[in-house]
Amino acid sequence: MNLHIIKHPLVAHKLTLMREADCSTGKFRTLTKELSRLMAYEATRDFETEHCDINGWCGHINGERIKGKTLTVVPILRAGLGMLDGVLDLIPTAKISVVGLQRDEETLQPVSYFEKLVDKMDERPALILDPMLATGGSMVATIDLLKAKGCRNIKALVLVAAPEGVQTVHQAHPDVPVFTAALDSHLNENGYIIPGLGDAGDKIFGTKHG
Ligand SMILES: O=P(O)(O)OC[C@H]1O[C@H](OP(=O)(O)OP(=O)(O)O)[C@H](O)[C@@H]1O
Ligand SMILES: O=c1cc[nH]c(=O)[nH]1
Ligand SMILES: [Mg+2]
């Protein structure tokens, strides 16, 4: 399975704070950003670098830089937006491609409502951002879309994954590694991850009522 569970005390601690039932919108949003920043550090660990000559204070010296075309981050609306700033803290030059998907509450199928990708997708690595990998439908639809645009180097970064979603993504796209802070137990009858975080989009945007 192309799954990477990021083990780090800070990651575990922050995720536990997010799981608390009384976690406020502000706190949830801050923790999402902090966690995304830490996880992006791990997810980019195998990026290829190349040597380069630079002008240092004492003359020409050898440096190292990331090889190839600038990465595009792909937040899946809405909840993926909560992860964007944390990742951009680490990769400020990243290009941003936005995919809007809303899971139908009855069928649990993703419904597409927005799409704006950057140019040269076939040359860029892509890092998909979404806090929740539940059935995997939204992630598979996003990878399908990126591949249709020629993208070949794709990674997925999620805060929490359900085994069902990991399996679905792996079956459809075994080449796409999934990075997560936790592999949780299962989905409930409404397609929510248990124990999970609840509705991440509602918590980040403050649209949770009651
Ligand atoms: O793996 P899946 O079963 O497809 O479920 C996961 C998707 O569901 C949530 O989004 P939602 O549809 O609630 O939209 P939102 O981000 O606007 O709240 C979540 O952020 C994922 O995109
Ligand atoms: O547990 C889940 C499943 C889908 N979307 C969420 O926000 N949470
Ligand atoms: Mg939601």
Image: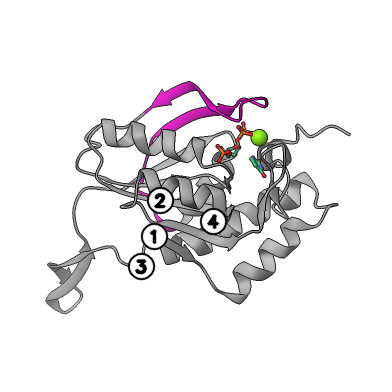
- Secondary structure beneath label 4: helix
Q: Closer to the N terminus: mark 2 or mark 3?
A: 3
Q: Residue 2, labelled with which disc?
A: 1
Q: Residue 45, labelled with which disc?
A: 3
Q: Is 82 inside the magenta-drawn segment?
A: no
- Kindly report which numbered mark, 2 or 3, lies closer to the viewer in this rendering: 2
Q: Is residue 102 above or below residue 186?
A: above
- Kindly report which numbered mark, 1 or 3, lies closer to the viewer in this rendering: 1
Cα distance in 3D space between marks 4 and 3: 14 Å
Question: What residue appears at the point 56 percent right and 41 percent down from the top-left corner?
Answer: 135
Disc 2 residue type (three-letter): His
Residue hosting label 4: 36
Question: What residue appears at the point 50 percent right and 28 percent down from the top-left corner?
Answer: 100
Q: Residue 170, labelled with which disc?
A: 2
Q: Are marks 1 and 2 in contact (CB under 8 Å)?
A: yes
Disc 4 residue type (three-letter): Ser
Q: Is residue 57 above or below residue 156?
A: below
Farthest-out residue, right: 210
| Magenta-drawn segment | 90-116
Pointer 1 local density, CA inside 10 Å: few below 14, some 14–19, many at least 20: some
- Secondary structure beneath label 3: loop
